[in-house]
Image: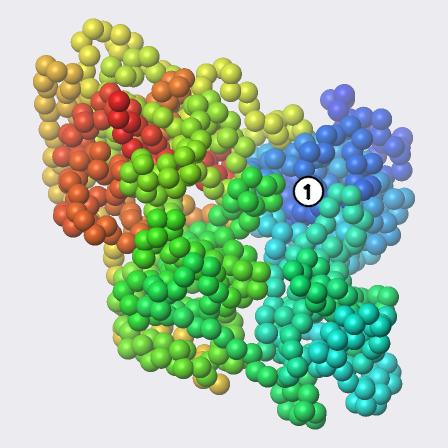
Amino acid sequence: MHRIVFVLAACPTWRLQTASSTEPCAAPDRTRWKSSFGHQMQPDWTWSSPAVCREVLYVVELQRYSRDQGSSVYFPQAVLNGDDLYDATLTDGHCRLRVTLDPGLNPLVERYVLRSGSTLCGAAFAPAMTAQLPACPTAPADGDSYKLLSAEVSDGAPGEDGGLRSFNVDSLSWFGSSGSAGALVPLRANRSVFLPLWNNVDYSGEAWREAPPAEEEEEEEEEEDRVQRHAVTVSELRDSFLIGRRGVARGVVHHQLIVRIINKSHLMYYGRRDLNCECPYKAVLEVCDRTGSVCVVLWNSVCLGWYRRLKPGDILNLRRYRVKGRFQAQLDDIEISVNSRNPAALISVLPESSPFPQHIPPAAFYRFCNSKELLDRPHGVVCDVIGLLTFSGRPERIRNDGRGAELLEYHWLRLEDGSSNQPIMVKLFSTSQPDAHHKLHPLSVVVCTRLKLIRAADGCDLAFYLTNTTYTQVYCTGMRHHSEMSYRKLRPVRQFLQWLRSQDDQEVLRRALIGGFFIYPSPPVSLELYMKDRRGVPGFLRGAELQRELERLRYRERQTFCIQAAVTMVMYSRRGEEKHCLCWTDRASSLCSSPCFRNSSPFPSSTPVTTRSARSPPSSSSPSLSPTSLGSTSTPADPRSGRKSRKRRFTETLPRKRRPFVTLQSEQNKSVILFEASMEFLESPNADEDKEEDEDGDTSSFLTGPLPLEQSDITLETLPLRYDHAHKEEQAVAIAMGGALTGRFDSVLDEYYTLRLRALSDGVLVDALFLPLSCSSPPPLLPYANTWTSILCHGAFCPHTPPPSPADLIGMATQLANQRLVCVLEACHLGGATTEIVLSRAFPLNH
């Protein structure tokens, strides 16, 4: 595979050419843009066909927003299938240009092919009006801006920014704008803020203020005297509204309401294509005073000014609000609506030392449960937890309700609190606290509030985890959270801190992991239990259907698939030594095999990015599948494979030395890291290679040498990493959404297996990773034999006995010949052409 390199021309111009021409647009007619540095660049014509930029361009930033009722006007010939539009900031190194991607290019962003740092060549543009004139400072004065129709992408691995890092982008002027640019807003929809690229829950952009908005002092002074004399309680508002006469709750309420925030919801985005709302957000606060509790709803731009500022435990003083019937309430109840207009609500945060002690609400309360107490709690109970973080999983996404269009971002956490040997597993979705989520490093002290307990369907006491509710919040070391929250004085927290101070840094670092493939709870260990867990509907896919589903996955989207298949190859590999592997092949099954879809291969370095190329390539040519690479094909078949002497080949080069899976990070001080975390609550090797050859008359043989089959290397994203405390920020960025892992971080597992599965329905081949040395669930109570059938049913080696050597396991692979299996596959798209496929379970089908 060749890497295409483009050289940026020294001339600081955006050279445009029409799509039908082979020469750049030339002067002196109206087809020339003056673009020398420091001069204003303005087009003064309308194009009858797209114009092509001959210079190399770099993608500085991609920004997502939802379209509105008028967005289709800007794309009259495009099919708007989704709700999202993307604006891109491009540069040639001399100025910046903002464009909107043609909706046909959206899948390339959604699959992380086109991203920040990408290099574009032959970019084709067309003019389009902007929805934000004159608010958008980057739009030309005549009201036109541009949309990107097609381009050719050439870049390196995800997370790299190529030649972009050689420019000081912030100092570059805007194309078509003589003044300095203000806050950027969407170009093709009447929205005031952008959405995060990967979820709808977090906030994105500088418009979300952490400091409270400035209030008009004159209004404040006029209200103060009257407010001190006229106060209202929650019960008075509720009684007044529900009796029918409304009274004090009629219309706009000017009386002050002093309440304490008990719970704070995540942001709720309600933007739709049929809704023209500039800032379609709302957030719900559960508040209380001494007479009762009520919900306060922050609407639209109030969220921009106040959401980040407010936290549970704060005392609010509200004025100019409306009282309404609570939406979707089972019983008659009220809610308080706080908006930015009609009228503009007044909000202030009062200190605990308020001059009105009679108005101070009761303190916030918590329901902390430790890991021992959670063993006896029923399904669905809501609680708070505190623990030492020893595993932080990679961020992934799943469909809302399993089939919706919205993707929900989550990652797994493992917390330890010392009350039992059972860790607290948390499936943490976005909580509108992106900064806090980025700080969730191992060895941090984490508090999660308002989590819901989920128990496995089989009722196993150990198979439980906690997950979000609407009001879940997370607080962690490094954000100064713990010193500000009232829970630090509670007895469960003090008991945890006492246990934490007794821990040793090195002992904790030994089990501290970050990233990698992770599944919890583990699937059932028998086909009967698996069918029961899926309520009798396994949802078997044909091989071609599986291929189509994999091609639809978006970046970091995780899905589980089920196929009926037979194993035609088993391969043992070590990371970095994939060319010398131990392999068993069922030659009889592979004689009539189809091309194979592999688990992993690098994305091509030069990719045409056009409206048409955004669609998945047709799969009718030959059904194929493999664990990390879409569209790769297998090595041509060996012409000698047609011989009558059927042989199963073993290709073996054993690793020189078995290295330990976990290497401890040395620390001079015993518990420096954990001591600092607790303070916030106060105000290679040389060996001979073993080669083995064996032949029998029954269809198997050992051969040594390079692997004759084309294979894919395992991706770094698949393997869990040892936590590196000295480079924790860099490591966290690498595993985050849009990050890129390099070989500088050590993985826990070096050994893995690849199983080639042949779908019984249509013969399509799938290469799936199998990781029997990685086990995320508690070990089974009863031991089992380390045969292939048992290992595949449990997804791991038996923890009660030593694992078999790779040579022994490959030697036993003949047990899989002619076996019909129900295979459970975990698929996750890792960006570009890389799709991770892991075999989590395989159950034999009994005749």
The residue depicted at 35 percent of the width and 43 percent of the height is 523
Q: Can you give x and y, in whole percent of width and height, for residue 355 in the image?
A: 70, 93
> Quarter of the image containing the N terminus?
top left
In the displayed structure, 817 sits above or below 716; it is: above
Q: Nearer the viewer, residue 170 or 509?
A: 509
Residue type at tag 1:
Asp
Q: Can you give x and y, in whole percent of width and height, for residue 629 in the image?
A: 44, 31
On the question of residue 208 being in view, the answer is no
Colour scheme in the image? rainbow
Left or right: residue 142 compared with residue 760: right
The residue depicted at 29 percent of the width and 17 percent of the height is 590
The residue depicted at 36 percent of the width and 73 percent of the height is 673
Left or right: residue 419 compared with residue 623: left
On the question of residue 469 being in view, the answer is yes
Q: Nearer the viewer, residue 206 or 624?
A: 624
> Quarter of the image containing the C terminus?
top left
The residue depicted at 68 percent of the width and 57 percent of the height is 328
In the displayed structure, 394 sits above or below 300; it is: above
Q: Nearer the viewer, residue 483 or 54?
A: 483
Q: Mark 1, residues whose alpha carbon is within 10 Å: few (<14), some, or many (≥20)?
A: some
Q: Can you give x and y, in whole percent of width and height, for residue 359 in the image?
A: 68, 88
Q: Can you give x and y, in whole percent of width and height, for residue 766 in the image?
A: 38, 27
Left or right: residue 365 compared with residue 44: left
Residue behind mark 1: 84
Q: Nearer the viewer, residue 192 or 49?
A: 192
Secondary structure state at the residue bearing disc 1: strand
